[in-house]
Image (spheres, helix red, strand yellow):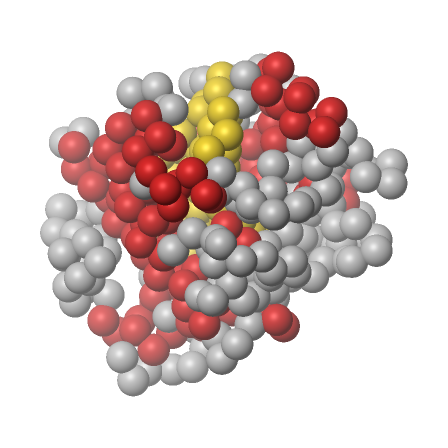
Amino acid sequence: MFGAAAAETFMGLPSAGTHTLPKGTGAAILGVPSATPYPSVGAYCALAPQAIRNAMAGYAANLEHPDFDHGEPMLGFTGFSAVDCGDLDCDPDDPTTARAKIRAATRGILNAGAVPLILGGDDSVPIPVLAAYTGRAPLTILQIDAHIDWRDSVRGESFGLSSTMRRASEMEHVAAIVQAGQRAIGSAQTGDLLDARRWGATFISARTIHEMGIAPVVEAIEPGSNIFISLDVDAFDPSIVPAVIGRAPGGLTYWQVVELIEQVAARGTIAGFAMVELMPERDLDGLGALVAARTLCNVIAAIRRQSERAL
């Protein structure tokens, strides 16, 4: 735990290309600094993937040590492997090309039989990631987010961070959307919420989770589903993740999010994961990046456990 302050890969995992993954790779991390940023704010989360890697750099030599969040080493003992594919080179001034690159890179990971673990970038990143699943098994999206992201467009841009779930709802392979953790005020208008409910999206607010626990979220997911988890880190309370563009009190705790991911993985199969909206420039002593990194460790462990169930 006294290693380097910066890391080339997450937790010292092997590096690989998205189209040249080693045979049998179980999960592949991919940094995506930018997709379709709004001109008014730019690519404000571009430094997040490296900040998340750096948060765990000091523990890279401890990969085989027990992780007491889940009771055993992150990669376990059965040969499960994960790699880090580095960051995509995405020009924030050319979002059309960026989206195409993101789709192709995600598809490369999927074609290799690995689970994509995407580190954004703002919340426009999951749109092309989800598009890469076209032609595959139907997806249930679990969005963990303070906001619902159902705007059709913002200032003429329909692929930005406020439209993620709206665009996802239009994809034929998206069978269900469960949205957890909403609180405070966001960009959504009343009509957007009505459209989401008419489509069939299920909402469980942060307040409901604090009152009733995570059970309503887990129960909203059909058993046996293929699940894509989209985690906007503003779902966390700003006391533990201050590194977001819009802070609001009353967010979720670390354990609520980790236990939700674990229970969802036990209920179905995690087919993909994206973590977005970390803004390192607003962080406090790296706290938010550390929470994000520890969450990623638990996601990898959950995917490893689901692979062990299939043995």
Q: Residue furthest front?
A: 211
Query: Residue 207 vs residue 89: left or right?
Result: left
Q: Position of residue 158 (x, y in %)?
A: 78, 34
Residue 197 placement: quadrant: top right
Which of the two residues, 152 or 251, is positioned nearer the viewer here? 251
Against 130, is 14 above or below? below
Against 91, is 302 above or below? above
- Residue at the (72%, 58%) spot, across then down: 43
Query: Residue 170 vs residue 134: left or right?
Result: right
Which of the two residues, 85 or 38, is positioned nearer the viewer here? 38
Q: Position of residue 13 (x, y in %)?
A: 34, 61
Q: Position of residue 23 (x, y in %)?
A: 31, 41
Image label count = 0
- Residue at the (45%, 72%) spot, across then down: 287
Q: Position of residue 261 (x, y in %)?
A: 33, 42
Query: Residue 187 vs residue 27: left or right?
Result: right
Looking at the figure, which quarter contains the N terminus? bottom left
